[in-house]
Image (cartoon, rainbow, N blue to C red):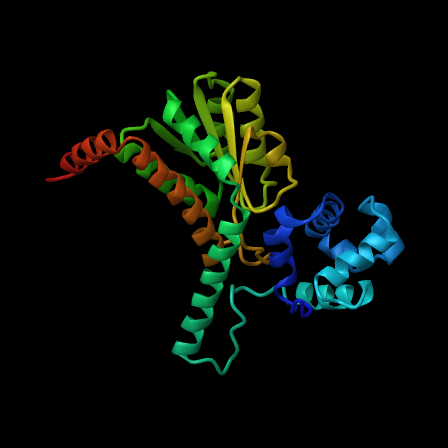
Amino acid sequence: MPPLQPGKILATLGAMQSSLSRTSQRIAQFILQNPQRVTTLTVAGLAQDAQAGEASIVRFCRLLGFRGFQDFKRDLTIELARSDAMLDADITPDDDVDAVSGKLQETVNSVLTQTRTLLDARQVRRAVDALLNAEAVYLFGVGSSGISAQEMKHKLMRIGLRAVALQDSHEMAMQAALLRPDEVAFAISHSGASPETVKALHLAKAAGATTVALTYHLATPLLEQADITLINGHHQGELQGDSLATRVAQAFVLDVLYSLLVQARPEQARANKLKTMAALKP
């Protein structure tokens, strides 16, 4: 394959992890968690930190289309130098409206493809079963992930599930500590490292609730607390906390869950949807 272009290396690594060997998965996870550090390492240093052989590092880089580790490190450095961009797409000063919209559409299409690749059907089915059988669902998230949690709450309420979404760190912690084994805690965090969300899921797990996590990263503190893991696509830069692509990726996974919930109990979902629609009429 041709070498990955700067700007697509980390996103592609995230999308292809499930198809890699165990050793390559370990290398990919280390790079995704420590991209800046990787640009300062030698091949021997990366081999030691990723617990892999030097030959495995070289094979991994060649799998991505690079001649070796130095070429990979150079292009990763270029990608990270661009990560202070505030936009999802590579918008230039000369781009007109059509060019900007086209680039954003390409980004959204790409992140949806990544998300479909990363979603594990077994984990999705486990999440649906947990939601169907839950006495109540508590959704946790802060920032833009909190908005995703609120949107999912409304979807679940409309089809008759008891759902609560919390964004305040104190409220999340208190509610999580009071959860029961017949309830579900559903945490959303793109980074998988938001302290408030990680703490809430930890408390929920300790209380005996079923815990679900939706995030981009496969190896994060959040997933350590999750019984069920859902992975969405898109690697965003540090200044892209309100990234369109991230919100689209999260919304896509949540809508897959919603669609499967409706599919599982269509008549009940329809009846409850009609009731909630009627309740909102003047």
Q: Is residue 53 above or below residue 204?
A: below
Residue 115: horizontal and vertical position, in percent?
50, 51
The answer to whether residue 243 is visible is: no
The quadrant in which the N terminus is found is: bottom right
Question: Farthest left residue?
Answer: 282
Question: Farthest right residue?
Answer: 44
Residue at 79%, 68% in the rendered image: 67
**Which quarter of the picture shows residue 270?**
top left
Q: How many marks?
A: 0
> Left or right: where does residue 226 sit relative to residue 128?
right
> Left or right: where does residue 152 sit relative to residue 107?
left
Q: Is residue 154 above or below residue 35?
A: above
- Seen from the viewer's position, the closer of residues 266 and 100 is 266
**Which quarter of the picture shows residue 200?**
top right
Residue at 51%, 80% in the rendered image: 93
Residue 246: horizontal and vertical position, in percent?
49, 53
- Seen from the viewer's position, the closer of residues 93 and 156 is 156
Question: Farthest bottom residue?
Answer: 94
The quadrant in which the C terminus is found is: top left
Residue 60: horizontal and vertical position, in percent?
76, 56
Q: Is residue 75 above or below residue 18?
A: below
Residue 43: horizontal and vertical position, in percent?
86, 57
The answer to whether residue 230 is visible is: yes
> Left or right: where does residue 151 sit relative to residue 204?
left
Residue at 60%, 35% in the rendered image: 223
